[in-house]
Image (cartoon, rainbow, N blue to C red):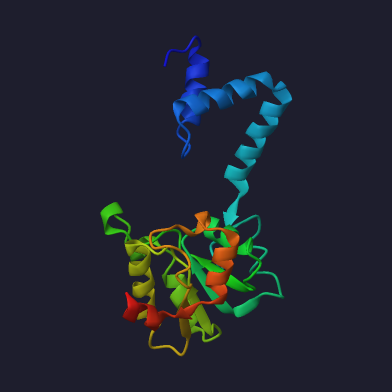
């Protein structure tokens, strides 16, 4: 792709590094920005810079937050005895959109994947086990994607907490095997949360 401006080329190259954004889409976005008032571009730049510098992760659930505790963890109306274990913040958003879950979350930050060099130590598993050890959690809901990596991560966590008096469940397989939660429709995902099954049962059926 030939560019008439090095500045334009640099902007397109940076924009094309975003997931799902190719060079042609990046060019279309950059040209769109050029058509906007300069104040619009300045506002976009400042908001991205502020987000990058000031955003933090909730000290309890590791969700993205503006404060030490995210809005979900600090909400007194949420059930602190039920924790939904998810891969990343996109899954929290997907489940919240169903309005079917009133517990809290624990964001692992990924899933065990030896092929990608991701082991248990790279994930937020220790802090989850510590929550269980405190004895205040009554149920863990495994809501990872139904992939080999997701199932492996579920089983690893289950083995860490199986000696404690806690119920472990997993979302019903209304989500197709191999699917990511963020792409499931809200009705299917909501039903999967409501119709969750004991985790031990999922081991026998797999």
Q: In the image, residue 108 lies at what x, y percent?
A: 46, 63
Is 37 above or below relative to 188?
Answer: above
Is 41 above or below relative to 121?
Answer: above
Task: Answer with left or right where residue 36 lies relative to residue 184.
Answer: right
Task: Answer with left or right where residue 121 lies relative to residue 96.
Answer: left
What residue sits 53% from the left and 77% below the top? Answer: 195
- Is residue 58 in view from this perspective? no
* Residue at the outermost left position: 115
Q: Nearer the viewer, residue 203 or 149?
A: 203
* Residue at the outermost bottom position: 165
Q: Nearer the viewer, residue 177 or 124?
A: 177
Q: In the image, residue 101 lies at what x, y percent?
A: 62, 71
Q: Nearer the viewer, residue 106 or 20?
A: 20
Task: Answer with left or right where residue 31 lies relative to residue 42.
Answer: left
Q: Quadrant of the N terminus?
A: top left
Q: Quadrant of the C terminus?
A: bottom left
What residue sits 66% from the left and 59% below the top? Answer: 67
Determine which quarter of the picture holds residue 49.
top right
The number of numbered badges drawn on the structure is: 0
Q: Nearer the viewer, residue 16 or 24?
A: 24
Is 82 above or below relative to 41?
Answer: below
Q: In the image, residue 120 lies at what x, y percent?
A: 34, 65
Q: In the image, residue 201 lies at what x, y percent?
A: 39, 82
Is 177 above or below relative to 5?
Answer: below
What residue sits 70% from the left and 32% below the top? Answer: 43
What residue sits 46% from the left and 64% below the top? Answer: 175
- Is residue 54 in view from this perspective? yes
């Amino acid at each position: 792709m030939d560019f008439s401006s090095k500045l334009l080329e640099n902007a397109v190259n940076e924009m094309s590094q975003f997931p799902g954004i190719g060079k042609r889409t990046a060019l279309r976005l950059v040209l769109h920005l050029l058509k906007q008032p300069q104040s619009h571009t300045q506002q976009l730049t400042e908001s991205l810079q502020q987000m990058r510098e000031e955003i933090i992760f909730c000290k309890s659930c590791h969700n993205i937050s503006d404060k030490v505790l995210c809005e979900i963890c600090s909400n007194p109306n949420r059930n602190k005895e039920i924790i939904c274990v998810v891969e990343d913040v996109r899954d929290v958003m997907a489940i919240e959109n169903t309005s079917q879950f009133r517990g809290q979350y624990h964001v692992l930050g990924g899933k065990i994947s030896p092929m990608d060099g991701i082991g248990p130590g790279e994930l937020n598993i220790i802090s989850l086990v510590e929550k269980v050890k405190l004895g205040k959690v009554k149920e863990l809901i495994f809501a990872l994607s139904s992939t080999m990596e997701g199932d492996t991560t579920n089983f690893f966590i289950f083995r860490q907490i199986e000696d404690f008096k806690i119920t472990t469940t997993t979302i019903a397989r209304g989500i197709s095997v191999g699917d990511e939660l963020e792409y499931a429709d809200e009705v299917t995902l909501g039903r999967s949360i409501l119709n969750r099954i004991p985790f031990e049962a999922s081991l026998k059926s797999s």
